[in-house]
Image (tube, helix red, strand yellow):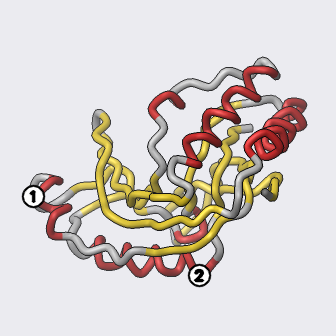
């Protein structure tokens, strides 16, 4: 099972993100755009785990909430940026919070809790909260110039839980063509 922790969005937030994405798509020749139902903020990526470890993953989230006792988090999604990876430029929308850096604190606490269960995470030392809008993003001009011209309407909402999610692939058929899509399924929600 491929697992991660996330701030899950309500439908209204997803709809606002989708509206923003329509305008961005018009300024991009290609990209693997995030589907509406998959919008979220990743708090910590766990990766492949055996089903018998799910209890430990749930407990890590519960212990994190007990330890940090976070208030409801005010989140503002605004601004655009990219992560350049070989053959894959990722387009993202930035995430600001109140209290400031609370998502970073949650990331660090979950990582520590998981280590206590013998689960080591990689790549979480570079935590940068964001919403992935497109993978394999291509622009009509260099990304810095393109981003400066793109408009993104800020979105504000509150979050009050950490959700353990499973990432899987689903194969679908459209006419004669088969393709796969990523599906994120909530496994367990821990309320603040």
The quarter of the rendered structure image containing the N terminus is top right
Image location (x, y in percent) of residue 165: 71, 50
Residue at 58% across, 54% down: 182
Instruction: Give the vertical position of 165 relative to 35 (above or below).
Output: above
In the image, 140: left or right of 51? Answer: left
In the image, 21: left or right of 13? Answer: left
Sequence-first disc among 2 and 1: 2
Q: Secondary structure at mark 2?
A: helix
Residue at 78% across, 39% down: 67
Instruction: Give the vertical position of 66 relative to 81 (above or below).
Output: above
The residue closer to the viewer here, 52 or 73, is 73
Q: Secondary structure at mark 1?
A: loop
Mark 2 crowd level (few <14, some 14–19, many ≥20, 10 Å Cα): few
- Give the distance between the C-alpha atoms of the residues marked 2 and 1, in whole angstroms: 32 Å
Please, which residue is most extreme toward the top here?
118
Residue that badge 1 annotates: 141
Image location (x, y in percent) of residue 2: 68, 39
Image location (x, y in percent) of residue 10: 65, 74
Residue at 86% across, 32% down: 56
Instruction: Give the vertical position of 116 relative to 87 (above or below).
Output: above
The quarter of the rendered structure image containing the C terminus is bottom right
The residue closer to the viewer here, 20 or 50, is 20
The residue closer to the viewer here, 56 or 99, is 99
Residue that badge 2 annotates: 12
In the image, 46: left or right of 29? Answer: right
């Amino acid at each position: 099972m491929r697992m991660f922790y996330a701030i899950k969005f309500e439908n209204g937030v997803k709809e606002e993100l989708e509206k923003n994405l329509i305008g961005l798509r018009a300024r991009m020749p290609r990209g693997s755009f995030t589907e509406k139902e998959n919008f979220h903020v990743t708090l910590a990526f766990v990766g492949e785990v055996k089903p018998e470890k799910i209890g430990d993953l749930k407990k890590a989230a519960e212990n994190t909430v007990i330890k940090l006792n976070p208030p409801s988090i005010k989140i503002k999604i605004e601004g655009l940026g990219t992560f350049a990876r070989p053959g894959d430029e990722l387009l993202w929308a930035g995430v600001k919070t109140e209290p400031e850096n609370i998502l970073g604190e949650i990331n660090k606490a979950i990582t520590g809790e998981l280590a206590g269960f013998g689960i080591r995470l990689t790549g979480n030392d570079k935590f940068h909260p964001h919403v992935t809008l497109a993978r394999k993003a291509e622009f009509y001009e260099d990304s810095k110039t393109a981003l400066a011209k793109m408009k993104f309407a800020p979105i504000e909402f509150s979050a009050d839980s950490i959700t353990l999610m499973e990432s899987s692939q689903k194969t679908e058929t459209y006419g004669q063509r088969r393709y796969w899509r990523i599906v994120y399924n909530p496994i367990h929600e821990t309320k603040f």
